[in-house]
Amino acid sequence: MATTPLFPVGAFHTESGVTYLHTAGEGLPPRAQHSRGFERYVTDKSQGAQGRARIGAEVEKVRGLAAKLWSVQPDDVGFVCSVAEGISILLESIDWREGDNVVLDPREFPSVAAPFALKAQRAKSGPVPEIRCADATGLAKAANSKTRLIAISHVSFLDGNRADLDYYRRVADGVGALLVVDYSQASGWCPIDASIADFAFGVAYKWLLGATGTAIAYWNRSRQPNWQPVTSGWFSLTTGRVTSERPNWATGALETRNDGMCFTRGNPSHPSIYVLGETLTFLAQWDAAKVEAHVQSLTEALLEELERAGIAPSTPRPKERHGASVCIDTVHADAIVGELAKVGLYASGGLGRIRFSFHGYSKLGDVKRLMGVFPAIYTKYHHGKKGESKL
């Protein structure tokens, strides 16, 4: 049981008296790592061409760290500014045919689902994919020979459910579809082998403890060796950048990088890349399986306490079926989260659910402090009917 934090709490930028259960929204920043990363960046930025070379070397170093975290090859890794950007690059690269469909979880995060859904609604010409929504229980029925892509978050932002990626891979292979995985709610607290996916993405600012502006992009080149993006920028081109010739925009053949950095169309967000390098080095001090065990001892403790209090979570109880968060559906989520904040308990709200999330800086005392006040606040908003939590 996680009676003490796994990480040194003093290393983080925190407010006095606050119990931080908001990592699923924003991870706590380790103070020294953020400061050192930005200081190194501005130093290199101010040193002309030599500094620019060091910036490039830093990007490559962080690619290696990200690849190690996800158990993949560095050349398959790139960076985008957000998961939404990566998904959109992938979406526009697919030669859609009449009758094609995409299968999404109905609880999917907007950055994964919205690019496909909006294309289906707004495209003015050409075939557009049908959007099919199905969770794991309906996936095999929803997917068929016209399914081009199945997208899933490894852990749901909405209810903390952890997807069985082996099952999703089997279904995708059975119909010849791409499997695209968002690791944003998983990367940083549990072991990851992204090679199960054809493409994968994940933000840096949650459990990876980094900053906004950078997300990891992964292209499984062994599974999809012939894939190419259809848009680019100066950074992802080889023509005129890696090679010396000046591009002929009218008639010249343009080549993009044949590695994960083809996702990085313009300059990557160098400040957040530097910070990510520092935070990945910090996290590498602990085996991911040890962080997972620590975190899930806390989710299990909270789920048990909620059951004892008669409050029904939307998060599955078995630890193999949930992530680092515990969620509760209620129309009063934002009001309850606001009341918790007034007493120094920071949680997430929005979309009709409360979310409590844990990381290596969390401990059992955080669960006890939460449960010392949460049941009374929850009951106040539900008129004493604790079971009425579902929307």
Image (cartoon, rainbow, N blue to C red):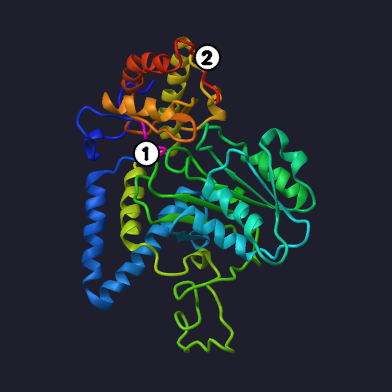
Q: Secondary structure at mark 2?
A: loop
Residue annotated with mark 2: 387
| Residue 226 shows in the view | yes
Looking at the picture, which amino acid does disc 1 mark?
Trp
Residue at 42% over, 33% down: 349
The answer to whether 44 appears left or right of 103 in the picture is: left
Looking at the picture, which amino acid does disc 2 mark?
Gly
Which quarter of the figure is the N terminus placed in? top left
The answer to whether 344 appears left or right of 26 in the picture is: left
Q: Is residue 23 magenta?
A: yes
Which quarter of the figure is the C terminus placed in? top right
Of tags 1 and 2, which is closer to the observer? 2
In three-dimensional space, the C-alpha distance between marks 1 and 2, rounded to whole angstroms, equals: 39 Å
| Label 2 environment density (alpha carbons within 10 Å; few <14, some 14–19, many ≥20) | few
List x then y, in percent, for residue 62. Answer: 38, 58
Q: Secondary structure at mark 1?
A: loop
| Residue range highlighted in magenta | 21-25
| Residue 344 shows in the view | no
Residue annotated with mark 1: 286
Residue at 73% over, 63% down: 127
Say how many tags the image has: 2
The answer to whether 211 appears left or right of 253 in the picture is: left
List x then y, in percent, for residue 353. Answer: 48, 30
Relative to the observer, which residue lies in front, 166 or 13?
Answer: 13
The answer to whether 138 appears left or right of 160 in the picture is: right
Residue at 73% over, 49% down: 173
Principal secondary structure, stretch drawn in magenta: loop
